[in-house]
Amino acid sequence: MSMVKVYYQCREKGTELVNHERELAFYREAYEVIDNYLWAEELAFFEELGEGGGFLFVLGDLDDKYASYQLIPSDVDRGVLLLDVVCKKGVMSFLGRKSISVDFDLVSISEAKRYIKELFEGSIESLYEKHKK
């Protein structure tokens, strides 16, 4: 079973964003991270301060082969969802590169969870094949 790392930012006792990092073995753990996020409070801080938190779920190694979903909160029950998959970095990060980027635009949190679950059920290559155009 592959571990998925989640990186996320939120505020704890104040207005400073605090970075968090966890390794997750099961998609239910990812759901817990999302469900325990203080959506309304973070969005209010974003409106006031102009900076907000978000999530990055990563399968693999960001310096090599990986698949990642980035979820950026935009409302209490929605967010912008982005997928990046790199199967092959290529020479100088572009020659021979095998990668895709998909912008799912605005999705509900339940939709985002369904997509993020793919990181726990498949491989980097299977995500590439599923989402390439």
Image (cartoon, grey):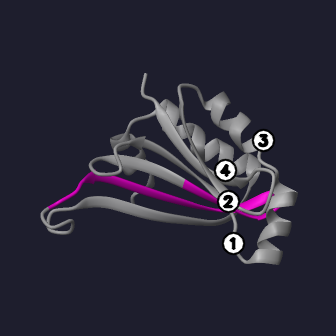
Check disc 2 and report its element: helix, strand or loop.
Answer: strand
Q: Do the residues labelled 2 and 4 touch (CB within 8 Å)?
A: no
Say which label, 1 or 4, has the lower sequence index: 1
What is the x, y in percent for residue 126?
38, 41
In the image, what residue type sits under mark 1? Answer: Glu
Identify the residue under disc 2.
Answer: 17
* Highlighted magenta segment, given as a residue range: 70-90
Q: Which of 11 and 130 is in front in this view?
A: 11
Check disc 3 and report its element: helix, strand or loop.
Answer: helix
In the image, what residue type sits under mark 3? Answer: Asp
Q: What secondary structure predominates along the stretch shown in magenta?
A: strand
Say which label, 1 or 3, has the lower sequence index: 3
Task: Judge depth for marks 3 and 2 and give the one in front.
Answer: 2
Identify the residue under disc 4.
Answer: 112
Dot 4 alpha-carbon crowd within 10 angstroms: few under 14, some 14 to 19, many 20 or more: many
Identify the residue under disc 1.
Answer: 51
